[in-house]
Image (spheres, grey):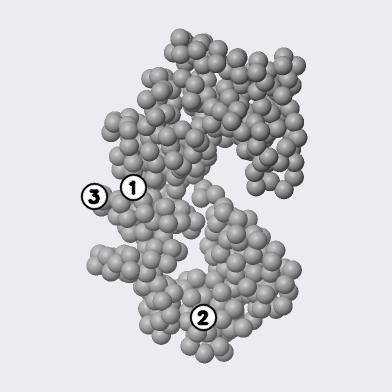
Amino acid sequence: MATPITVGERIVLHLAQYSKNQNDFDVPFEVSQDGIGEALRISRAHAAIELKKLKGAGTVAERISHIKAGAVKRKVYFLTQSGEDRARNLKDFATRQGIEIMPLLDLKKCKGEELWTQLNPELKALMAKSVVFRKPFKRSALPAANVSLLPENKEGMVDIPASLRSSIPALLDKTSLREAHSFAADYWLSEGDFIERLHHLLEASRCMEAQMLLANRGWQMARSAGPEMLESLKRMDDILPRYAREVRRTRGESARRNQDLTYGLKMAEEMFLTGDPEEIQNALVLKGRLLLAEGKAQEALENLRQAGEQRSSPLVDCDIAICLGKLGQNGEALRLLESVNRRGGINDPDLLEEVYTRKGEALVFLDRKEEALANYSKALGLARSGDKRGIYKAMAACYDALEMREKAREYAKKASVKRSGSV
């Protein structure tokens, strides 16, 4: 591979793109220290050190200027005449040595096909592995390269621009694409993000492993399932009989949590058709919860009571209490919730968290907001993994109803923060 261009030389080439803006009143963000660092995937401190050297050499000039869409003036940098000459010499050198300049500059400005044609085989292999990731990943997971191709932040994480994630995979052959997804699947196994692992296993055609993952962790994964996981679950086919029960259960729960009532009811019907007593009981619970979400409290109550007759469950009792609250049978609902309190003996922290959450939901319907908050707080106190935004949102609504505006804003802010999908 050709000798790499230094960071200082990359700054010169970067600033050469903005020579036309030298006399502008409002200059681009990309000529500030932060803009240079962001474009070249280096820290602000590193940019400052290199710029000081370039100023000392008379290659760049510094001034204070307005930044486009910025509120205050900032230090900005442009090439001197000596710098312009150096930029031209660097471009000529790069051409003679076969060094591709564009990937060394702002990756976000690169168009997928144009970038791909400029990369040598080694960098193509690196980029292929990177563009299949949907979430930021550790740069250290990939082989080192002689050029800083990937946009790495100060924590060593890479977040590939969306334009490249959507365009470059279409340029890969099927084998390369499967290998890239397979690499990502193994990466997320080591990171403990099983929802991302499921996606990449399916894209890598490692369907058996995807089914095994759901058999072992499907119910956990469904607890924090977003639309991406539901989409993965819908794509799965040719399910082996030994994994089918857990796949159906996970699909149903994921559909419920994503408010996809049609798909959830389809899963419930498939569970009924198996004739298996345990699946029928699970189908009754799923159908009851889906009908409850649809606002059909009476039909939901009938299914949930039938499920409760087959096997007692504190979660089902909480769902029944919600139905009763919606139907105006508050006294019976409160008595049922009290029986859940007396029962105790729940040793599974995941289940206990969900019981407290569901009790909170029931108490909201019964207009007992303070008791609901106490249960939501207990659910949060268990500190289990998964997405807590639903609990935060419910607590914000309770605080708002109790006219505790500051607490309502605090929890509404927490509800707006996207959490990791790992389980």
The residue drawn where x is 30% and y is 51% is 236
Q: Quadrant of residue 402?
A: bottom right
Q: Is residue 6 visible?
A: no
Q: Which of the labelled discs sits on residue 238, or is there none?
A: 3
| Residue bearing the label numbered 1 | 211
Determine whether label 1 and label 3 are within 8 Å by CB. Answer: no
Which secondary structure lies at badge 3?
loop
Work out how far the residue at label 1 is from the one at label 3, CA to CA, in angstroms. 10 Å
Work out how far the residue at label 3 is from the one at label 2, CA to CA, in angstroms. 39 Å
Q: Callout 3: few (<14), some (14-19), or many (20+) C-alpha neighbours within 10 Å?
A: few
Residue type at mark 3: give it: Asp
Q: Earlier in the sequence, mark 1 or mark 3?
A: 1
Q: Is residue 322 left or right of residue 78?
A: left
Q: Quadrant of residue 286?
A: bottom left
Q: Earlier in the sequence, mark 2 or mark 1?
A: 1
Q: Is residue 15 visible?
A: yes
Q: Callout 2: few (<14), some (14-19), or many (20+) C-alpha neighbours within 10 Å?
A: many
